[in-house]
Amino acid sequence: MNIHEYQGKSILKSFGVAIQEGIVADTPQEAVAAAKKLTEDTGTEWYVVKAQIHAGGRGKGTVTETDSRGVVLAKGIDKVEGIAKAILGGHLVTAQTSDTGKQVNKVLVAQDVYYPGASEPEEYYMSVLLDRSSGKHIIMYSPEGGMNIEEVAEQTPHLIFKEEIDAMLGLQGFQTRRIAFNLGLSGQAFKQMNKFVHALYAAFIGCDASMFEINPVLKTSDDNIIAVDAKVTLDDNALYRHKAYAEMRDKTEEDQTEVEADEAGLNYVKLDGNVGCMVNGAGLAMATMDIIKLSGGEPANFLDVGGTADAARVEKAFRIILKDKAVKAILVNIFGGIVRCDRVAQGIVDAYNNIGELPVPLIVRLQGTNAEEAKQLIDDSGLKVHSVILLQEAADKVAEVLA
Amino acid sequence: MSVLVNKDSKIIVQGFTGSEGTFHAGQMIEYGTNVVGGVTPGKGGQEHLGKPVFNSVSDAVTKTGADVSIIFVPPAFAGDAIMEAAEAGIKVIVCITEGIPVNDMVKVKAYIDNKDCTLIGPNCPGVMTAGEAKVGIMPGFIFTPGRIGIVSKSGTLTYEAVDQITKAGMGQSTAIGIGGDPIIGTTTLEAVKLLMNDKDTDGIIMIGEIGGDLEVKAARWIKENGTKPVVGFIAGVTAPKGRTMGHAGAIVSGEEESAEAKKAIMRECGIHVVDSPAQIGAKMAELIKN
């Protein structure tokens, strides 16, 4: 589950990670109040107003309606209202969003942390994630902060460092020292970096994150180390032990049909094609999408009805697929193992009876447990379907109805 | 003999008396699998499906000599169940459970690395040696004893391959569902090695999907060490980048993780890659007959 920057920072702070302080606001007026409070708390006189959406590249992104950037520096409290007004309610388009962008419902008003002082501020990159090939967590970091890390990896791979963490022992002192040395730190900043990395890893484990990306980590001019941005992804499978984090889910950031599918226990991803599909099992679902493409169509969705598909769920799946007006045909591909084909067939028949005439051709392949009973159910229903047995026949039939 | 499990395996079921455990243990027994008992903490001493129930895996091992365990425990407790089985000396641990937190699996993997056991899964359909032992949730009736081994991340795609092999007039030795999670006990490479060294297997079907580098590692090993024909399929050519497709591990996060990239590498390594999942059985039949 992805969460907003302000939520990620609140989690980091709760584990003792030093952050750029900020207050979230829903309206320009709230943004001004937030700025006043920040000045009381931190003494800052400049502010950074940051659009809160689930996508990166906000600083270089543009709000369609106003041409404002997604992250703007306010050099004085009198500038805050106007800046917030130009961002809130608009659609922010960044390199990571679609062309229509994402609507901004909240801004984070944050303290200015690039103030002048005894030393120059420095930016670093740091992330914590799972290295799938070793099955261990790693901290990946670079002195090239504030930049797109993919570009750093491509152009200057020697400036990316990795620290692998022993699952039994956790992060050790010699490791955080190595990180601080590799980042060229000494003195007070060195000590602060050690503290920062320990707290960051504790937060990662403590909140069951799948990924932290802190870009930039900032060394301030007075040698403090703080997280200026925070991209936090939480492990969905662990949310049951973090009820408060589960409530951080912002459904407005997600495709509404996908949210609806999720609530019905369906695993659905909307795609841009013309052939809808309903399949049991993620691997077979992807393979079915591929076969649609090989047959001359494009998959309109990924949809896994899961291992306990019953009639009600199948009907819901149909309704979700049919919402997409680009869909010109539907392919149902069920290999019954645990899932009984007759139950799926019942769902198809129920959907037919409740929805009425299906507006597009329906190709049904039911194989495995109770496939015969399923075929009988569909034959008796009067439902017009193209019934096939082999996967190849399903592919051929898709090509035929699209032609 | 096939690999991992056979008719002589002594199998226990963890999460025996739960609804999933009950249903699938029943199916396993019906298939003729040698289930010697089950574990449900607090229900030790009872009998379930005609088999003894034990409080702990170590009790079960002491009393029955079990060497294989299958786990149907809910995700919050499944990591613990795997470690319990490993600690009790179980040699092959098959974990069906889907949805185990990644951090739990990081610890489990570190723990079992020092134990003499093989973990299959989690989030997998299990292991099946046709005609001998069904240690999983695969539908038994689609299998026919034979000489084709199958390695797959996906459950239903395994069934698809099994069915095609049967319909093409061949049969299966062992089908290994390695699971679709980011951290799994047995990799594609390890499963392929087992089948490559199995004298009862003549050909191998390797089914993968987008995400990770398991198929690429297996392909590179096969290039150097392969002695049997391998048919490969990678699901997810049409999957958009950056999205998780059902399986937690099925996400393209780097160039080498896309289906096209994996297939290209597999072809370079001499694997017979099919673009259509409908051609898996036919391709193997063609290779075996030659």
Image: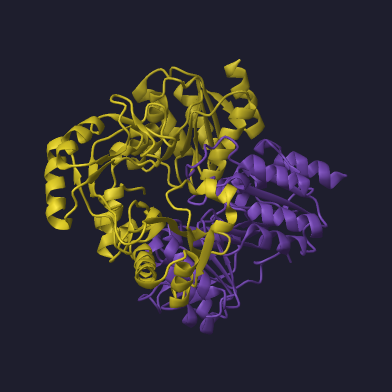
Chain colours: A yellow, B purple
**In the rendering, at what x and y percent does residue A111 appear?**
23, 51
Nearest the eye: B230 or A386 = B230
Q: Residue furthest bottom?
A: B62
Residue A143: x and y in percent read 47, 58
Quarter of the view holding residue B193:
bottom right
**In the image, residue A135 lies at what x, y percent?**
53, 64
Relative placement, left or right, of A64 versus B238 is left
Placement of the C terminus of chain B among the 4 image quadrants: top right
Residue B271 vertical placement versus B79 (above, below): above
The residue depicted at 16 percent of the width and 55 percent of the height is A43
Q: Is residue B150 above or below residue A27?
A: below
Give x and y (percent) for residue A281.
Answer: 51, 44
**Residue at x 72% of width, y 46% of height:** B265
Q: Is residue B217 above or below residue B10?
A: above
Q: Is any part of residue A235 visible from this angle?
A: no
Question: Residue at image x 80%, y 51%?
Answer: B229
Q: Nearer the viewer, residue A343 or A320?
A: A320
Looking at the figure, which quarter contains the N terminus of chain B?
A: bottom right
Q: Work out whether residue B173 or residue B64 is closer to the camera in this orientation and state it.
A: B173
B14 with respect to A355 (left or right):
right
Q: Is residue B196 visible?
A: yes
Count up the numbered dots.
0
